[in-house]
Image (cartoon, grey):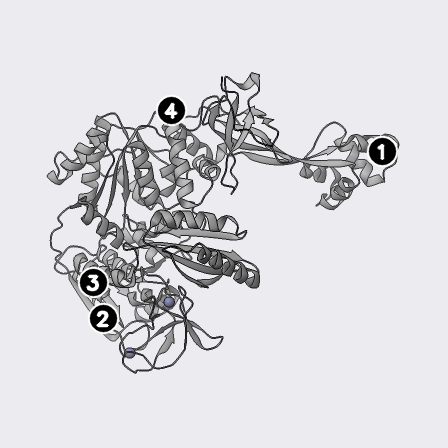
Amino acid sequence: VNVFAEVVFPIPVDRTFHYAIPEALRSRALAGCRITAPFGRRKMTGFIVALMDKIPPGPFDIKEIADVLDETPSFSGSFLSFSRRLGSRYFASWGEILQAALPPTLLPREEKKIRLTPLGAEVLAAEGLTKRDREVAILLRDGPRSPSYVAGKLGIKDPGPRLEKMQSRGLVETRVVARRPRPPVESGPAKAQRQLEFGFAPSGPSALAGIESGIAAGEFGSFYIMGPEDARRDAYARLIQATLAVGRRVIFLTPEISQAEALRGSGTAGPGSSAVLLHGRLAGRAREEEWRKLLEGRADVVVGPSSALLAPLAGVGLIVVDEESDESYDQAEGRLFDARGGARLRAEEEKAVFVRGSAWPSVEAYHEAVAGGGLIVLESGRRKFAVTVLDDRGEKGLLSNALKARLSERLGKGDPVILLVNRRGYSPYVFCPRCGHTPKCPRCDIAMGYHRKGEQWVCHYCNSRLPASSRCPKCGGTLVQRRAGGIEALEEEIRKLAPRAAVARFDSDEAGREKERDRVIDDFRRGRISILLATRLLFHRSDVPRVPFAVMLSPETLLGLSDYRASQKVFQSIAKMTGFVADDTRAEAVIQTSNPSHFSIRAAAAGDYRMYYDAEIEIRRAMNYPPFTRLAEVLFQGADPRSLARKSREFRARLEDRGGDIEVLGPALAAVARVRGRTQIQVILKSSDGKALETLLRESLEKIRIKKSVRLS
Ligand SMILES: [Zn+2]
Ligand SMILES: [Zn+2]
């Protein structure tokens, strides 16, 4: 009989805990169920991950599980093993991953309760309390209450200090209790809930046959579908159909909700598979209902952003990660895992086919797809519009004269126009106006940041420092610092140029809310807006109308990013800009840049991915970056820069003690040196042995008690 349970809690501690299961709960305590149990001095909600009839002997007392919260398990066995691997791979605890997989309405809530102690009751009865303390004690006489209840009854704002004083005298005590989540209510279809229909193309390229046979065989396989959006969508529809035909299910990841919603309208009503959208913008109850549909097998397809990877559906046969190179899949601050790596893990675990796709793959993914034989290229016709590169060196203002002339001509004809800027150029951004060169670290080949303190350029990877000379090392020209032109400045210039034109902005400040963004796109489509100014935020929209004239301003500012992927970002942002241009001989895409000869800009202008890739892969090889090595970026955060610096040096020392085939760069101030008053310090690890890297990281990070995030590539 299983009388013990192995339990994890949603805390950043990477281990499991053992509990005894009391007789009365044994029939209900199953693996995958949520439970409450005493943990330290309080009761916490956790998850049963395994049951056992005996446990390893230990010095500790075995406590009992207090309650089982689920009638049926929230997680299947295969999901449990997947989530364990996912957590371990990305340095999150198993319990944290399980918590992230639950809809918020099922998340354990904890409450503080204040209780009168026997001593308190005694003193109250003996009339030994002051007036205020007495009032509190009387409130608590009939049972524990929350501090806010006490505050409300006594008419005071913060009862904290009084309660603390009483607690220190032993009159009251505080307990944290887990509140049992409300049971689900059967609700009608919520407003945000949508049935998705996938249109099925009757035939498709025979190249997909290989993927289809993998799906039919129920084997893990990895593929990359490279091609324009329309062609990809048809291919996905065919693969989804093939998966449903063998009775298996589909996880479809796409970076933005508008893209997920666009899938709904992607075709005619096909054989109605039930698909659900799962994302953070669904209201609590609606999201829980969609989640239950997946858990109970009432839906076969889930569509959503990274978080949908944790959807509870069983029998997954196909996992698609569309727009593979999108940054929203990255393991950045606040995200527990990298969605691409995580999707591969889940596909392996479920013996599913793993398909990534985009028009412009990341260098790593393309390299792997070519090497592994899983690359499928869907042909796109030659584009009919022209792409022009305008050199803005020596021009004043954000808009060059040549661009102004083109804009005026287009506006005169009544053509709608899109102008894109990169606000992501971290300033101050140092560059040579004569040759366009950005000073780079000779060791790391990434752009160096300028630090006023000490007049230095600093490499954010290896912490190398060079005196900030004012001469360009390439051509001897005078280096200048400039800020990447922001969208506000652009708006000002455009309004001067075309005072009567209807101008709108699409960026996170001006069009902050989703509704507002939808409205801007809608107005643009209806012709109420003639000039749309946008940041990279626009790339996530698949409902932008194609225009006869689109412009990318200063893509080279992205080369100033302290990131080995900088040139990939340049290529991709230009390539995506050209995606907004109507495929028409009268249409034109313009790139205005002060670095027109950079290979990423030339290749993007030519629309030639292979040209970009061939140049970039050689740099990656020479400088030893992924895909030729595994790289881990460890970011430490702390309010006190000194102790942060000390701890990150300790971390480095610990890594070096272990030796092995691992290169350590840093600690160095991160490219974004301060975030919300906290200093950020980065340490980079490189190794050709991914397993060794992960093991070393795990062991070395364990002892560093500061806020940290790790990004593996
Ligand atoms: Zn120069
Ligand atoms: Zn360096």
Q: Amino acid at mark 3?
A: Ala
In terms of image quadrants, where is residue 198?
A: top left
Label 4 SS: loop
Which circle, 3 or 4, is nearer the viewer? Answer: 3
Residue under numbered circle 1 = 123
Count neighbours of disc 3 (C-alpha within 10 A) and say few if under 14, some if 14 to 19, many if 20 or more: few
Q: Position of residue 37 (x, y in %)?
A: 58, 29
- In the image, taking residue 273 as reference, residue 112 lies left or right, namely right
Query: Is the distance from the Cβ of mark 2 to the nearest ligand 1 atom less than 8 Å?
Result: no
Secondary structure category for the residue under label 3: helix
Residue 199 visible in image: no
Query: Looking at the image, is mark 3 or mark 2 earlier in the sequence?
Result: 2
Q: What amino acid type is highlighted by mark number 2?
A: Pro
Q: CA distance from mark 1 to mark 3?
A: 81 Å
**Residue at screen point 51% across, 31% down:** 7
- The residue carrying mark 3 is 615
Residue 274 sits in quarter: top left
Q: Residues within 10 Å of mark 2 (few under 14, many from 20)?
A: many
Q: Residue at x 34, y 59 (%)?
A: 535
First of labels 3, 4 by sequence position: 4
Looking at marks 1 and 2 on the same chain, the residue that comes earlier in the sequence is marked by 1
How far separated are the C-alphas under marks 2 and 4?
56 Å
Of the residues shown, which amino acid type is indicated by label 1? Answer: Val
Which of marks 4 and 2 precedes in the sequence?
4
Could you say whether the residue bearing mark 1 is in a helix, strand or loop? helix
Where's residue 343, x and y in %?
A: 32, 40
Disc 4 marks a residue whose amino acid type is: Glu
Which of the labelled discs sits on residue 296, or is there none? 4
From the top left corner, tell me how far across and down residue 50 is, in percent: 46, 27
Indicate which disc, 4 or 1, sits on the residue closer to the N terminus.
Answer: 1
Local secondary structure at mark 2: loop
